[in-house]
Amino acid sequence: MLSGLTVSSRENLTSRVYAQLREALMAGRFWPGQRLRIQEIAQAMGVSQTPVREAIMQLVREGGLEMRSSQAITVTNLSLTRYKELREVRLLLEGLATEKATPLLTASDFARLDELHHQLVAAEKGGDHEAAHFTNFHFHFLIYRASQMVDLVSLLESAWLRNGPLLKFLYPHAPPTYSGPHQHLTLMKALRRRDAAAARQAIQDDIIEGGARLVALMEQIAAGEVELLDMPDGSFQLNFRAQGRRKRRA
């Protein structure tokens, strides 16, 4: 899960480490509740522990990570209640960002959206779940950043910082499904028509419909019907046979 994190020695190391970890959290590269170790991250990124520690403290302040002690750093794990609360915020803010972006998207933006959507579909079919998370993240934020509303995008990044790790639950147990065409296709049609209201509705429908199975899975986790197991090799898996409360290996 730490592979692919790199920094350039020619730039401010703390800023680079922070940016890499922040995007990884937003794009669903880490599991909810996953324990992070400063030494392991530093080794993976080829830097000393100091910039990693400083970046982690910044992410703790933003709510993407939690720190109970210098040795207990974990990825934020939203409860079902907090996820639904955050979803309400996202519906408003992502709808607004999409509406504002609609008249500003360029031909190259549309070409890139098409490319990202095809990559997402291919990654899902090929079972490359991490690529699917990462591509979906870039699809959405290409639109949001096109709004040219810096503070709005910053708020959305903060929301995805908390929400992103839950994307790990999507595959293979709760993949996004749609009763009709993929909502990305509906969204892109509305954007090309410059129909801001329809585009706003499509992005909100994508959040609700595409995340319906995730909510159902989180309800099972909250009810103790599923537990998240921390495996000895550092990986994670969901156990659907659990009847008790969710347990994690210390």
Image: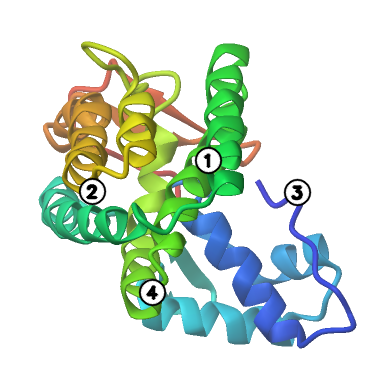
Q: Earlier in the sequence, mark 2 or mark 1?
A: 1
Give the labeled residue for mark 1: 110
Which disc is residue 154 wearing? 4
Q: Amino acid at mark 4?
A: Ser
Real-space CA distance between mark 2 and mark 1, rounded to the nearest whole angstrom:
15 Å
Real-space CA distance between mark 3 and mark 2, rounded to the nearest whole angstrom:
39 Å
Q: Amino acid at mark 3?
A: Ser
Q: Earlier in the sequence, mark 3 or mark 2?
A: 3
Where residue 9 appears, x then y in whole percent?
89, 80
Viewed as shown, does residue 16 lie left or right of 133? right
Q: Earlier in the sequence, mark 2 or mark 4?
A: 4
Circles 3 and 2: CB atoms closer than 8 Å: no
Q: Earlier in the sequence, mark 4 or mark 1?
A: 1
Label 4: few (<14), some (14–19) or many (≥20) C-alpha neighbours in 10 Å: few
Determine the residue positioned at 65% across, 36% down: 233
Real-space CA distance between mark 3 and mark 1, rounded to the nearest whole angstrom:
30 Å
Looking at the image, residue 54 lies above or below residue 85 = below
Real-space CA distance between mark 4 and mark 3, rounded to the nearest whole angstrom:
26 Å
Looking at the image, residue 180 lies above or below residue 81 = above
| SS class, disc 2 | helix
Location of residue 151 by image quarter:
bottom left
Give the labeled residue for mark 3: 3
Q: How many marks?
A: 4
Real-space CA distance between mark 4 and mark 1, rounded to the nearest whole angstrom:
23 Å
Viewed as shown, does residue 138 lie left or right of 76? right
Of badges 4 and 3, nearer the viewer stands 4
